[in-house]
């Protein structure tokens, strides 16, 4: 009996050890996958920024450093060694805007917002936006008809406090007349953009850092500023062209053009409201396929 118990104990000990090794094997796979993912995003970051030229320079310095060691070039190897030692600090200073942009993009990724999956859509959370969408769309349409330029930044989760510091805080209920008067030519607040926060007209005469990735030379300063804001935040930016009167929307560093009042209203409802409710308080299923097809046809022209 004693031998049987010992045998059973040895069996379970061996099984447990094998399970530990199995877990270690799975952990190695996870480790390799995470490293591959980090390398992928690092290469993607380098290709999309000025860091591509930096990497070429680092590779060149590294090759020279290897040859200096092989050829026993003491002075040059000593200099390059100190360059590599303190180079990371210099890179962090020089490429601070790009690094900040990458970290902000990571912060608003689906991984960081995974907790939102467990939140139930609330009618109260939508109420602050339900009564602001119509004034935004109507004002954009009127400004478009009169060919008056406008830049309306609709904040979502990421706040734009830096742009508000030197702006004029108005904190008002949205209305068509107020939005139109803000952008009326030669009015005190017509320069810059309008920030809408939590469904209210929060601040006017806001200035934003323009995007440095715009290749289309036909886009003016408003469109570049709109793209710049959308690159560093999750804001929805409505732009009205002063030259053509075309209504555009910038999100996630991309610009969609040729909106009408109806398509703009549907787009904002789909992206700002977690649910749309009827008069009885029942949620209405959002119809995004229609807006995508309409915008797709318009963009193809």
Image (cartoon, grey):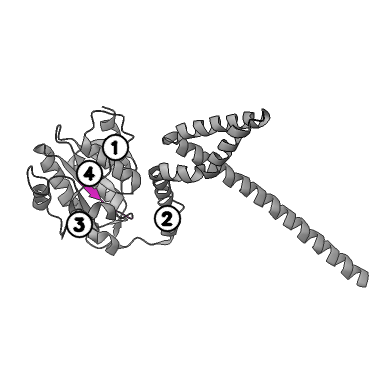
Query: Going by the image, does 242 lie left or right of 209?
Result: left
- Which residue is identified by label 4? 238
Please name which of the two marks, 3 or 1, marks the residue nearer to the observer: 3
Choose the circle earlier in sequence order: 3 or 2: 2
Q: Please give left or right for residue 22 compared with residue 116 in the image.
A: right
In primary-sequence order, the first of circles 3 and 1 is: 3
**Sequence order check, earlier mark of 1 and 4:** 4
Q: Does residue 248 appear to the left or right of 52 in the view shown?
A: left
Instruction: Of the two numbered discs 3 and 4 on the same chain, state the one appearing first in sequence.
Output: 3
Closer to the camera in the image, 227 or 289: 227
Position above or below: 188 against 55: below
Tell me residue 278's x, y (percent). Answer: 24, 58
Badge 2: residue crowd in 10 Å (few <14, some 14–19, many ≥20): few
Residue with the mark numbered 2 = 113
Q: Is residue 192 magenta?
A: no
Q: Quadrant of the C terminus?
A: top left
Residue on which disc 3 sits = 202
Tag 4's secondary structure?
A: strand
Whether 155 is among the magenta residues is yes
Q: Which residues are magenta?
A: 152-157
The dot on residue 32 is none
Residue highlighted by disc 1? 255
| Residue that sits furthest to the bottom in the current view | 1
CA separation in Å, label 3 and label 2 = 25 Å
Q: Nearer the N terminus, badge 2 or badge 1?
A: 2
Q: In screen coordinates, is 22 left or right of 274?
A: right
The image quadrant of residue 84 is top right
Q: Nearer the viewer, mark 3 or mark 2?
A: 3
Residue lying at the far front in this picture: please name it: 75
User: Can you say which quadrant of the picture contains the N terminus?
Assistant: bottom right
**Tag 2 secondary structure:** loop
């Amino acid at each position: 009996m004693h031998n049987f118990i010992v045998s059973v104990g040895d069996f379970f000990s061996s099984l447990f050890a094998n399970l530990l090794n199995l877990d270690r094997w799975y952990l190695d796979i996870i480790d390799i996958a995470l490293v591959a993912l980090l390398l992928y995003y690092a290469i993607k970051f380098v290709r999309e920024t000025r860091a591509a030229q930096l990497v070429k320079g680092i590779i060149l310095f590294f090759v020279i450093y290897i040859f200096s060691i092989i050829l026993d070039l003491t002075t040059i190897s000593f200099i390059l060694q100190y360059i590599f030692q303190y180079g990371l600090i210099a890179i962090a200073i020089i490429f601070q805007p790009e690094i900040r942009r990458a970290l902000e993009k990571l912060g608003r990724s689906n991984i960081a917002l995974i907790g939102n999956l467990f939140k139930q859509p609330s009618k109260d959370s939508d109420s602050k936006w339900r009564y602001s969408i119509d004034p935004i769309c109507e004002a954009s349409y009127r400004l478009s008809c009169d060919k008056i330029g406008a830049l309306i930044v609709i904040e979502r989760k990421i706040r734009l406090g830096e742009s508000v510091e030197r702006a004029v805080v108005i904190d008002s209920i949205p209305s068509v007349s107020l939005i139109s008067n803000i952008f009326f030519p030669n009015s005190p607040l017509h320069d810059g953009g309008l920030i809408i926060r939590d469904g209210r007209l929060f601040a006017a005469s806001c200035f934003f850092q323009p995007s440095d990735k715009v290749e289309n030379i036909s886009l003016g300063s408003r469109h570049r500023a709109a793209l710049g804001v959308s690159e560093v935040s999750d804001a929805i930016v409505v732009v009205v062209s002063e030259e053509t009167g075309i209504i555009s929307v910038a999100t996630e560093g991309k610009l969609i053009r040729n909106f009408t009042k109806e398509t703009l209203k549907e787009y904002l409802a789909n992206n700002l409201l977690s649910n749309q409710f009827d008069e009885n308080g029942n949620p209405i299923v959002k119809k995004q396929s229609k807006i995508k097809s309409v915008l797709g046809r318009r963009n193809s022209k």
